[in-house]
Amino acid sequence: LSAPQVSNDTFAVCDLELNQVSIVGIVRGFTPFVTNMQYSVDDMTGPPLCVKQWLNEEDWSLTSVPPGTYVKVIGSLRNFSGQRSVLAMNIRCIKDLNEITSHMLEVVQAHMLLFEKVLKGLRESSLKVKPKHPDRPQVVLSSIAHKPSRYGVWGLVYKNTNLLRSCVLAEGISLQDLKSQLDYLSMRDIRASLVFLVNEGHIFSTIDEHHFKSAEH
């Protein structure tokens, strides 16, 4: 739901247009209306999603999905009056819990393919820039460095990884040094990408919680 909206009903993630989405979650509640049924579906990645399914006369004879049921939703992301929701083309109850595991693997695969595309784009457009501090190791930054919003958090992670790898100091690079070299980014975004890198095991803190070093050294 955090995907940028590029037009009326068009959303994108890293320049890739979202057409159809697949969601697996548990129904927390539902509200019937004259022409549609609205479900609150929790996929455990954030607040429950609002899922709307249009109904015709034949559909009203069907029993609504009760709360506590795992479902798979196929639909498209919509924005109505500033509120985002999923317009469902199909809602199916999950009877085999292996489907949940399968969906999680699909999400990981999509995540990896997207991350690979972002990194490839960053590598192809990378160039050397003159460092602000000549006495420090020179690093390679992306030519899109001043457009971090295009690649979101993955662009931040990639740039932070390069900076940390290039640092040869025993204590690693400090948070303030990172901020000075990435002065076009907010401290909040830098901290968020550092937390991700620490959790993934790519970096670790050294002398204190404000100094970090690449795990590859």
Image (spheres, rainbow, N blue to C red):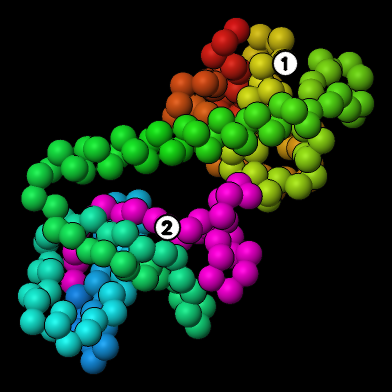
Q: Is residue 34 above or below residue 137?
A: below
Cα gap from disc 1 to disc 2, whole angstroms: 40 Å
Residue density around tag 2, few if under 14, some if 14–19, many if 20 or more, within 10 Å: few
Q: Start and end of the magenta stretch?
A: 1-29
Three-letter code for the amino acid on which mark 2 is drawn: Gln
Magenta stretch secondary structure, dominant: strand
In the image, what residue type sits under mark 1?
Ser
Q: Residue 63: x and y, percent?
A: 7, 75
Where does the N terminus fall, quadrant-wise? bottom left
Labelled disc at residue 104 = none
At x 57%, y 10%, the residue is 216
The residue located at (15%, 38%) in the rendering is 98
Is residue 215 magenta-colored? Answer: no
Q: Which residue, given by chain and number where applicable, does mark 2 sit on? A: 20
Task: Give the secondary structure at mark 1.
Answer: helix
Q: Earlier in the sequence, mark 1 or mark 2?
A: 2
Residue 80 screen position, x and y as percent:
47, 80
The residue at the point 9 percent across, 76 percent down is: 62
Label 1 neighbourhood size at 10 Å, few (<14), some (14-19), many (20+)? some
Q: Quadrant of residue 110?
A: top left
Q: Quadrant of residue 56?
A: bottom left
Residue 193 % position (x, y) = 57, 37
Residue behind mark 1:
166
